[in-house]
Amino acid sequence: MEAAIGKTQGSRWALRTRPEQMRSLKFYLRRAWKADQIGSEPGYESTRKYEPERQSCRQPQEMGGLPQRQREERKKRVFRIEWRFVVKPGCEEQFERIYGPEGEWARLFRQGGGYIRTELQREEEVRTYRTLDVWRSRNEYEKFREEHGADYQSLDDHCSGLTESEMEICASEEIEFSANRDS
């Protein structure tokens, strides 16, 4: 919807709309209000979503809202490392077993204090995978690498025969929201 901006008396700027724009806006708003009041007109779908009325600006606990403190507790900063692998032909099954959430890498990472999880994703490209390792913080990951460096290198050497290439895509700290309300 176009609107014209013009100067009014007293050097103030005002937003002016054309009469035909106002008529179409009023028609649209009236039609949307009617549809929500009556139900729905044939062939018209309301774009408004139902929102229960609230007594205050805070959503009560029984309506599914969480107090600010609990919302903050559900947010946590994590350290993520993402890798991309191109697997040699015929080695896909063994690769998935070793790099999967219950594989050898995950078992090694669990020896570290700040390890959260590993995700393995197969890409659309042939024999291409991504892994995502999630840690509580960069410091805990680095501490793990210092304490278990020899085991890490040994497993990495053992797995190098499965891949044509491997590349670290990113290592970053991000905010992750817990899906479980109890955590």
Image: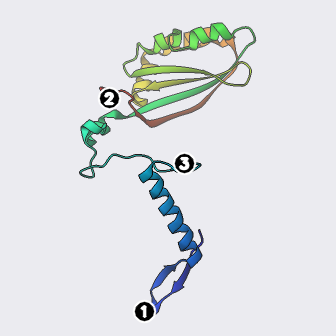
Q: What residue is pinned by disc 1?
A: 10
Q: Position of residue 39 (x, y in %)?
A: 45, 48
- Marks 2 and 1 sit apart, C-alpha to C-alpha, by 56 Å
**Which callout, 2 or 1, points at the residue further toward the start of the chain?**
1
Q: Secondary structure at mark 2?
A: loop
- The answer to which of 104 and 57 lies nearer the viewer is 57
Q: Position of residue 118 (x, y in %)?
A: 50, 20
Instruction: Give the position of the C terminus as an image quadrant.
Output: top left
CB of mark 2 within 8 Å of CB of mark 1? no
**Which callout, 1 or 3, points at the residue further toward the start of the chain?**
1
Query: Which amino acid does the dot numbered 3 rest on?
Result: Glu
- Say left or right for 130 vs 36: right
- The answer to which of 55 and 101 lies nearer the viewer is 55
- Marks 3 and 2 sit apart, C-alpha to C-alpha, by 33 Å
Query: Which amino acid does the dot numbered 1 rest on?
Result: Gly
Q: What residue is pinned by disc 3?
A: 45
Colouring convention used in this rendered image of the protein: rainbow
* For discs 1 and 3, the disc positioned in front in the rendered view: 3
Q: What residue is pinned by disc 2?
A: 181
- Say left or right for 68 vs 143: left
Can residue 101 be seen from the camera position used here? yes
Quadrant housing residue 87: top right
Query: Which amino acid does the dot numbered 2 rest on?
Result: Arg
Crowd class of label 1 (few under 14; some 14 to 19; many from 20; radius 10 Å): few
